Amino acid sequence: MLKRKWVLFDVGGVLEIVDDDAWQDEWWLRWRRVSGLVQSEFDARVASATLPRIDLSTGTEATFWRELSGALGLDATQCAAMRADFWNAYCGRGNEELIEYARRLGARVGVAILSNSADGAREEEERRYAFSAVFDPICYSHEQGVSKPDAAAYLLALERMGAAPSDVLFVDDHQASVDGAEAVGIRAVLHRDNAATIAAIEDFLRP
């Protein structure tokens, strides 16, 4: 019996069209302007806030927004707007072509997600893109407690997939994450555009 192959996808910059290297800075800039604070005062207030590591823990999102909005002197309406703006920026827009390709791919091989994330990402991305209807398992850093490119992130994903490294192709838009996958024996492709990524996947799946 042939081993089952898997394709493991990153989310931001791959399944979601978003500039992972820019959106956070742009988001902070927007909310500095809303706060009306000069850069030095804004930075000092953010630094003084007791913000939990929402990228490596669950059940922390509400505390994060409460502490951040309090430090910046934002009211409840502004806090809600800041949170909504964060998730809109975080999630970008769906890469519909690649998501649909993954949906069809699921009839042939396993398809899963390994993504650095923030507490609340599962709910927000499910609401927008219904990832659970396509991908299983979905491995988020805030739920696993470890993020790429730490080797443990990939090993936990392999464990949940029940797969050997040689049976998996990982797709990510950051070279460091690609390198991390390859360091544990997972073949990886650096995502630049859908056509090249799909071609790489098809090559991996070729008998």
Image (spheres, rainbow, N blue to C red):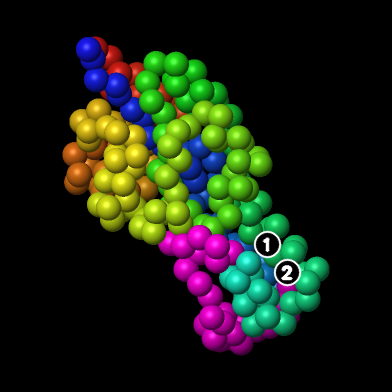
Q: Which mark is residue 79?
A: 2
Q: Looking at this view, is 182 or 41 the one in front?
A: 182
Whether residue 190 is visible to the viewer of this picture, yes or no, is: no
Dot 1, how many residues are within 10 Å of its Cα: few (below 14), some (14-19), or many (20+)? some
Residue drawn 59% across and 85% down?
45
Residue 38, position as x, y percentages in the image: 65, 84
Quadrant housing residue 39: bottom right
Circle 1 — which element?
helix
Residue 127, position as x, y percentages in the image: 66, 41
Residue drawn 46% across and 62% down?
57
Residue type for callout 1? Arg
Magenta span: 34-61
Q: Which mark is residue 197?
A: none
Reply yes or no: does residue 27 show up in magenta.
no
Task: In the rendered view, tell whether residue 35 sits above or below residue 86.
Answer: below
Residue 140, position as x, y percentages in the image: 45, 49
Residue drawn 25% across and 28% down?
167
Reply yes or no: does residue 55 show up in magenta.
yes
Residue drawn 59% across and 70% down?
64
Quadrant housing residue 33: bottom right
Location of mark 1 (residue): 83
